[in-house]
Every structure is written in C-alpha cells, then in structure tokens.
Image (cartoon, rainbow, N blue to C red):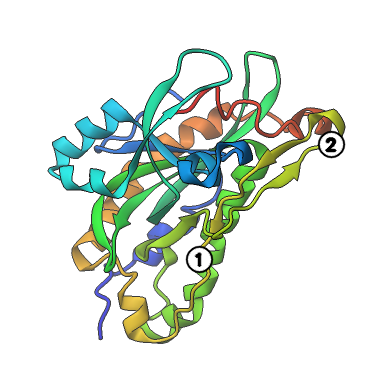
Amino acid sequence: MSFNIPIGANEEMRGSMDVGGGVKLPFPHIFMSFRNGKRDAGKERGEQYFGGFQADEAEFVDYLAAIGKQDVLNSFNLQTLTPRAGDPYQAYMRRGLAVAPIAARSRWFQTREGKNVLKRQVVGLMALGTPLQYVGPVVVTASGYNQAMNLTAAFDANANITANARRQHAAGAAANFFYAYIGTWKEDGEFVMVGKGQNQSPITPIAARSYKVETAEELRALYVGDELAKTVLEYRKQAQEWVDDWNKKRDEKPDAALFTDTEASADDIPF
C-alpha cells in the first residue's frame, strides 16, 4: 500500500505549522471560526450548546456553489447567532471537522474594549463524511489565548496519533498529508473556566478526537490522496506570503492580566 507523496515534500512542509492581515490566500477558501458553546442554550440547539465551527451563511453557500459542492450543506446546521454587540446573524455550523493542515499563523489583536486577544488561523484541506470525502480549502480560526492554544494542541495530538503509522507505512510522511479531527467530541459537552478572578469565562475546548491509527489501512483512511498531496505542497508555497503577513505584524505578548481575558473577541469578530 503506497503513499505517493512528492519527493522532497517533507522538507517543503517543515515549519508549516509554526506560528507566524492584509494578504489574502491566492486560492478559493472558506473561513470557519470556532464559537464557544453556552450551557444555557440547551443540548437541543446543537453547536450553540456544544460549541463548533461557523461559516457565514451567504459566504458558505457561494463558496460551495463555486466549487460544485452544494450537497455539503446537508452536513452542517444553520444557526441564528447573537453577538455581544450588533444584530443576530446566520451561520452554518458543525461541531467537528477533518482538516489536513497546510500552514498556520498567529497574532495578537486588540478588541474595541482595548483588550488583547490572540488569534490563530490554520489553512488546510477540509473533508467530511465516512469515508472522508474532500470538500475544499478552509481557514480555521480560533480566538482567545486558550482556544488558540487548544487549536494548536489538537493538530499536534492528531500528528502524534498517526506518527508511528506514518513512520511504518508512509516512510515518515509529514502529518500535513493526513486529515486531522478537530472540534468538540464529548457526548455531554465540556465547559472549562479560564482566566482569573473577574475575568473568568467558560469555553468549550477545541480538541482532537480520540481514535487509534496503527495499520496501513487506518492511515490510508486519513490520507488526502496522491493528487491532493501535490495540492497540499503547492498551496503551502502559495500560503507563505499569507503567513509572513502576520509575522511582520505580530505584537509582543501583552501583560498576563490582559491576555487572561481570553474570549473577549470571540463574539465580536466571528469571521
């Protein structure tokens, strides 16, 4: 069972998930930001309780039409969401995604209240279903110090899960060529208090799904495929300017008293 990943690809992908505006990615993509769930929403409201990834309704419909994947809407729930300030909006949501990560960037932003919030973005290839079916490029965003770290940890955990299998069956191929499961997975939901003192707030932590990958067949189920492996490599090169843009603008880490107010912008800047 072969994995025909381009020669030299591992070297090209080295550092792709290191943390790195105005520069846009030069290929079609959809933004999906993580929104924390709320305990008082009730389980019957799905992602509004459990937390999940959201995409603007109109933008997602247009994106799927452009790439010919309109049937994917059936895998998402349309939710009416209310931000802390402003009018309600509609977004398609899903608790979990499978994403083959291509590149990542991080940067501190200041909210309207003058508080510093860390944002992390990962661009990758999104797949859904069982078996996994490729949909298209996606940019996943986590706002707030803890969720930004959780997003990073979720991709790292997926890479660790497949590490032995990649060494044994795929000649040590980089984790970028395999889909990673990220989202909220616990049946009853999970709410964790973060921050200190009066700045405490609950989050629904982004995490990796718990699963095992030992055999070549199990690894093959996560593989993007030979043609998309070439796409991953090409998109990695095209995304470098996008990564560098935030690297140039990154601020120094603010005082601990500020960055512990971790979710200040999660509702303010949803996309």
Asked whether residue 170 is in view, the answer is no
Q: CA distance from mark 2 to mark 1?
A: 30 Å
- Where residue 87 appears, x then y in whole percent? 46, 14
Q: SS class of the residue under badge 1?
A: helix
Is there CB contact under 8 Å for labels 2 and 1? Answer: no
Q: Residue at x 74, y 32 (%)?
A: 259
Quarter residue 117 falls in: top right
Is residue 179 toward the left or the right of residue 45 in the image?
Answer: left
Is 73 or 164 nearer to us in this picture?
A: 73
Q: Counting other residues with Cα less than 10 Å from the Cα at mark 2, is it few (<14), some (14-19), or many (20 or more)?
A: few
Q: What label does residue 196 carry, if any?
A: 2
Quadrant the C terminus occupies: top left
Q: Residue at x 12, y 43 (%)?
A: 68
Which amino acid is tagged 2? Lys
- Where residue 119 appears, x then y in whole percent? 57, 35
Quarter residue 118 falls in: top right
Which amino acid is tagged 1? Asn
- Where residue 70 appears, x then y in whole percent? 16, 42
> Badge 1 is on which residue?
158
Quadrant the N terminus occupies: bottom left
